[in-house]
Image: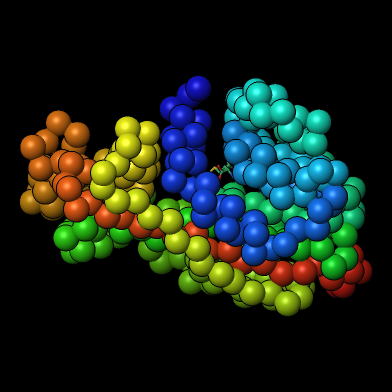
Amino acid sequence: MNDYAQKLYLSDLLREPVIRAAIRKLQLPSGSRGLDAGCGIGSHTLLLADAVAPDGHVTGLDLSAGFLAHAREIANKSGHSERISFQQGNVEKLPFGDDTFDWAWSVDCVGLIPAKPISLLKEVARVVKPGGILAILLWSSQQLLPGYPLLEARLNATFPGIAPFVEGMNPELHFLSALGWFHKAGLNESTAHTFAGSVHSPLGDDIRKAVMSLIEMRWGDPRSEITRDDWAQYQRLCRPDSRDFILNRPDYYAFFTYSMFHGKVASVGALKA
Ligand SMILES: C[S@@+](CC[C@H](N)C(=O)[O-])C[C@H]1O[C@@H](n2cnc3c(N)ncnc32)[C@H](O)[C@@H]1O
């Protein structure tokens, strides 16, 4: 597995309960057919296939052939492979006809392609039958450094912390404005929910690795964007070889949130209007 695929795999250890809660909220009909757009290594494709069992089907779509190879391998081992298929493609121009699916879902993909969110939502809605659900989920916050809210706020203000949003960008393109996108894309009954996941000490080895990987994913190397003092404190708290490594604290607690925006697809005619 390449480095990013490994990070997705580790983050699933933290995300799975949150993603399952979001799927439950949607009440996807048993036996329905859905699309996981930007499925990565397919972990959520499997959870979605569980939700529409025993007769439903989920197609995972991604740009990356490498991720799809992992996704197929994981699905084959899961025993769900008959009810899942994977296809390489671009969410901006989906390789499916109008009204192919009963619903579509996307985690950290559709909402994170900042250029033209409304046309992107319309493209995903195009392949969903009228009345079907379109849901996008986005990682929306984290508190990983208990006791250091100022340092954490400054880390969150660095480029990796706010990406793909950048300073000066139209606020309507920030993903927490997605209800506006849903409205403009002609989706009905649009709404949003936020789901929280948390961990606390004692951390098992896998969860520990997952939180370390998460810290790396959220903030990376922010040296050029923070002060020397903040960099020193970040190293002190977040390096596993540091005496003060924060995950070693017996009272360590952290949480994160995913926000889900969803609505119902109108008729194709209404979307094209
Ligand atoms: C942050 S990962 C999320 C993967 C998966 N949904 C998850 O949560 O584990 C974003 C995924 O979107 C895919 N992606 C990015 N742009 C895409 C596009 N235009 N069309 C299809 N997939 C895309 C990437 O290859 C990657 O797998």
Give the vertical position of 185 relative to 139 (above or below): below
In the figure, residue 53 lies in which quadrant?
top right
Q: How is the image coloured?
A: rainbow
Residue 26: % across, % down: 69, 63
Q: Judge whether residue 249 can be spotted in this image.
A: yes
Residue 40 relative to residue 123: left or right: left
**193 or 95, which lies in front?**
193
- 97 with respect to 72 (left or right): right
Q: Is residue 148 left or right of residue 179?
A: left
State left or right for residue 239 relative to residue 116. Answer: left
Q: Position of residue 80 (x, y in %)?
A: 74, 33
- Residue 104 coordinates in the image, percent (x, y): 74, 54
The answer to which of 132 and 220 lies nearer the viewer is 132
Is 179 situated above or below 98?
Answer: below
Q: Residue at x 64, y 70 (%)?
A: 181
Question: Residue 149: image x %, image y %?
Answer: 20, 63
In this picture, is 140 found above or below 4? below
Determine the image quadrant of residue 244: top left
At horizontal 41% and vertical 66% (from top left) the residue drawn is 168
Which quarter is ligand 1 in?
top right
Give the camera-side residue of 16 and 169: 16
| Residue 72 seen from this side | no
The residue at the point 11 percent across, 48 percent down is 233
The mark total stands at 0
Q: Using the rendered view, name the quadrant where residue 102 is placed.
A: bottom right
**Quarter the C terminus occupies:** bottom right
